[in-house]
Image: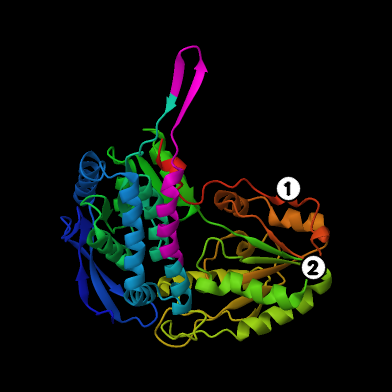
Amino acid sequence: MAVATGREYGLFINGEPVEAQSGEIRELSEPATGEPLARVAMAGEADVDRAVDAARAALDGPWGKTPPTERSRLLHALADAMVANRKELAELEVRNVGKAISSVKAELNQGVENFRFYASAIASIAERSNAIGGSLLFYSLKEPVGVVGQIVPWNYPLMMTTWKLAPALAAGCAVVLKPDSATPLTALRLGQLAAEVGFPPGAVNIVPGPGTSTGAYLVRHPGVDKIAFTGSTETGGEIMRLASGPIKRITLELGGKSPNLVFADANLDDAIPSSVWSIYYSAGQSCEARSRVLVERSIYDDFVSQFSRKTEQLKLGDPLDPETQVGSLISPEHRDKVHGFVERGREEGAEVVTGGEAGNGKGAFYRPTVLAKVESSMTVAQEEIFGPVVTVIPFDDEKDAIRIANVPGHSVRRLQAVGLRPRARSRDARALPRDQERSRLDEPEAVQSLRALSS
């Protein structure tokens, strides 16, 4: 079905769409065209209270009494509903976010599999009994953590919503999910689909709103037992602070400045296309985008030349066109922010080999950009640009590559926060750095797990 423009969306609380008590409405525009898309209610504190109360009532009532086998059936049914409504969901996501439909279709398929995986994984929630000597018997019982507050970002709203909902619902938790105020449409539709397939009222609640007000209130709400957040490192730090008082459980997936490592013996016919894809898919608006490419100095010039030619072949344009490879950015404001980073790179001595300017038309397009002659001390090598911009940095040997990958400062905190490791590319696995273990950072939970959501 075609997505109607100009539609009004309410909140989704206790199994049905409702008006926001806050009275606040946000006008949404399509990032790729600038045309009006929808009007969406924004949740205030009173609305979050209603959603948390509904979630708690569901836990104390029908949802809390739902056995694991039925939870599994419902999750499979929700996956089936996503498949049945895939055209609507895909178009809604494309028009709300601006990313290429080829990417959105892959993300939608991943969302379906998220529900199916956790529907099957419910059987892994194991309880134990152990004899500990004499007549003593130890019992380990698992139960849901409770009401889970979930906050998803604007760059993957559909997939991230499934990523958050699936494990929480599998564990028997009730959810209050806050999508970003700019991209709430597919999350709201998933809430409706959950109700249609039989999830009890209150098990899934969707409350769009600003992070600084609605999100902060959800985090510190006394009726919320756990917070799961995906977004910026700075906001994640603030959530840790807010959750520290009541010692509330949290799961954080934060920013990144992730490197690719390309050695002189790499097969460039393989390394270059995959390196191009790993930065420019989703127009570079991904925490795990390989936004730094570290290249051994002896092949640096050749690599930059070939990488830039491949980048120039990417099709930038209408995100609903199946041939488009790079869609628009989320907003003109974000496009200007990305361009500001590129200009800062020029000022600090980086060379703009290709791109470095906005695309044609009214949309928030930015041409895929390659920055060469970059030093690891430059702002563009340190900060998360979150756009279609790659920095290509030379290294001398293995130790130098590891040093640059783990360069001290802001970028390392971000790399550690998301737990990504450099990806080394070499023809011969034996030629990979012996010191690579030192580049492998601790990997915290990137998503909620059943173990974290049942105790």
Residue topped by disc 1: 438
323 is higher (above) or lower (below) than 181: below
The residue furthest top is: 134
In the picture, measured across the screen, residue 288 lies left or right of residue 149, that is right
Which element carries disc 1, helix, strand or loop?
Answer: helix
Check the picture and name the quadrant holding the N terminus. Answer: bottom left
Q: Amino acid at mark 1?
A: Arg
Q: Position of residue 451 (x, y in %)?
A: 46, 41
Which of label 2 and label 1 is nearer to you? 2
What is the three-letter code of the residue carrying label 2?
Arg
In the displayed structure, 369 sits above or below 397; it is below
Give the image location of residue 135, x and y in percent: 46, 13
Going 37% across and 75% down the picture, which residue do you hit? Answer: 90
Q: Can residue 357 be seen here?
A: yes
Q: Quadrant where the C terminus lies?
A: top left
Give the residues in magenta. Answer: 110-138
Q: Nearer the viewer, residue 430 or 156?
A: 430
Residue 238 placement (x, y as % from top left): 43, 45
Residue matched to label 2: 427
Q: Position of residue 303 (x, y in %)?
A: 75, 76
Q: Secondary structure at mark 2?
A: loop
On the rendered structure, is 405 left or right of 161? Answer: right
Label 2, label 1: how far apart the Cα atoms are: 21 Å
Residue 61: quadrant of the picture: top left
Residue 137 magenta-highlighted: yes
Is the Cβ of the residue at disc 2 closer than 8 Å to that at disc 1? no
CA neighbours of label 2 inside 10 A, class few (<14), some (14 to 19), many (20+): some
Quadrant housing residue 395: bottom right
